[in-house]
Amino acid sequence: MQTRIAVAGVHGHGATHVTNAHRYGDLVAIADPRPPDDVGVPVFASLEELLAATEVDVVVISTPIQTHVPLAELALRAGADVLLEKPPTASLAEFDHLSKVIEETGRACQVGFQAQASAATWQLAQLVTDGGLGEIRGISATGKWLRKAGYFDRAPWAGRRTLNGVAVVDGAVTNPLAHSTAAALLLDGSTGVDDIASVETDLFRANDIESDDTSTVRITTTRGTSILIAVTLCAAEQAEPAVIVHGSRGRAVLNYTTDTLELPDSRQVLARGDLLQNLIAHRADPAVPLYCSFAATGGFTRVVEAIRLADEPAVIADAFVRWEGEGADRHPIVHDVEHWIDRAADELALFGELPAPWTTP
Ligand SMILES: NC(=O)c1ccc[n+]([C@@H]2O[C@H](COP(=O)([O-])OP(=O)(O)OC[C@H]3O[C@@H](n4cnc5c(N)ncnc54)[C@H](O)[C@@H]3O)[C@@H](O)[C@H]2O)c1
């Protein structure tokens, strides 16, 4: 029998999950308060109503961050396995709560970090473990993205730290470029909640939002690695994010959006698996490991928690920002942000330590 799949949240990124549910199983129902047109399966206004009326094996949750935990708990307690979009939770307390629900119900929960389904990521992780890059000086991640006003205007939770008193933590590090941090932690073998020794945050924003859009974060793992994340949503143009391993025998660069792995002496494009297909395989045979189990997002969630608890991001002064476009296309460009991101990544330094010009009064 085909795996019976329900999808919660089908506009935005959820549309990909609907396509995937058809590809890898049997899409039996959809939950979304904004019903989609002509989908050919029953549509419910809430996941609760869906689960009351439908037999489901797997629930895919692609809804606003602050709804992840209650919806995942509903699905797990109804006996379903879950594919939960990233970031899985907005706080460590939520992470602990959902960990207990997973343990109690004995169900599986895969998290939507699709870069972890890439052979490029796993091959580099193996190379690091085998010492192929020598001694690791550090790991860094760069993200130079351009997001326009329409991105932040698409939903009430976009760019928010909280909504109606509930944690959202939708900033550049924790959401759009979250794969960078998750992949860097995976490469260090530090995905667990107890693998993080400290997290230093240096958060800024040029957009008129609550959250950070131009940030550096330095994570020190309990094995002693420095991981420096340097990202912006205010680049002059969109570039591929990169995760860089700095080894004594050279550096390796992972472009996780294209599954490209650049090593000191080669460049390869590798295959990518699928998170839903892998969850279905894991259901059939628990010996098949999940690409990204909920437990393996504990280290990432420690970073989310540090950003949640950090002071509000500092506003980047007008002198360092140029605005382009009109209406939904309007967007800020932080002067030379690409240069400062590259320096932060090379030197494993926070923007304020370089110092990038907008960080000094
Ligand atoms: N893995 C990735 O690369 C990737 C990419 C983009 C977004 N995402 C993640 O996917 C999730 C959704 O992001 P988005 O940008 O599509 O958000 P969005 O706000 O644009 O869309 C969310 C959808 O969920 C629906 N929804 C809201 N509350 C709901 C509820 N209680 N029950 C059911 N449906 C509900 C909305 O009507 C909408 O259809 C977020 O966690 C986001 O971080 C992941």
Image: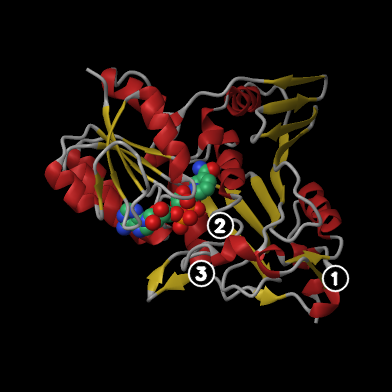
**Which amino acid type is shown beneath numbered disc 2?**
Ser
Q: Quadrant of the N terminus?
A: top left
Looking at the rendered image, the disc whose residue lies closer to the viewer, 3 or 1, is 3
Q: Earlier in the sequence, mark 2 or mark 3?
A: 3
Q: Is residue 78 above or below residue 284?
A: below
Among all residues in the image, which is located at the extreme bottom? 361
| Rendered image: mark on residue 198 | 2
**Which amino acid type is shown beneath numbered disc 1?**
Pro
Near mark 2 (Cα within 10 A), the count class, few <14, some 14-19 or many ≥20, is: some
Q: Which residue is mark 1?
A: 357
Residue appearing at x 31%, y 57% in the figure: 33
Q: Position of residue 214 (x, y in %)?
A: 70, 63
Along the line of sight, which residue is nearer the eye, 176 or 299? Answer: 176
Disc 2/disc 3 C-alpha distance (Å): 24 Å
Near mark 1 (Cα within 10 A), the count class, few <14, some 14-19 or many ≥20, is: some
Residue appearing at x 76%, y 57% in the figure: 349
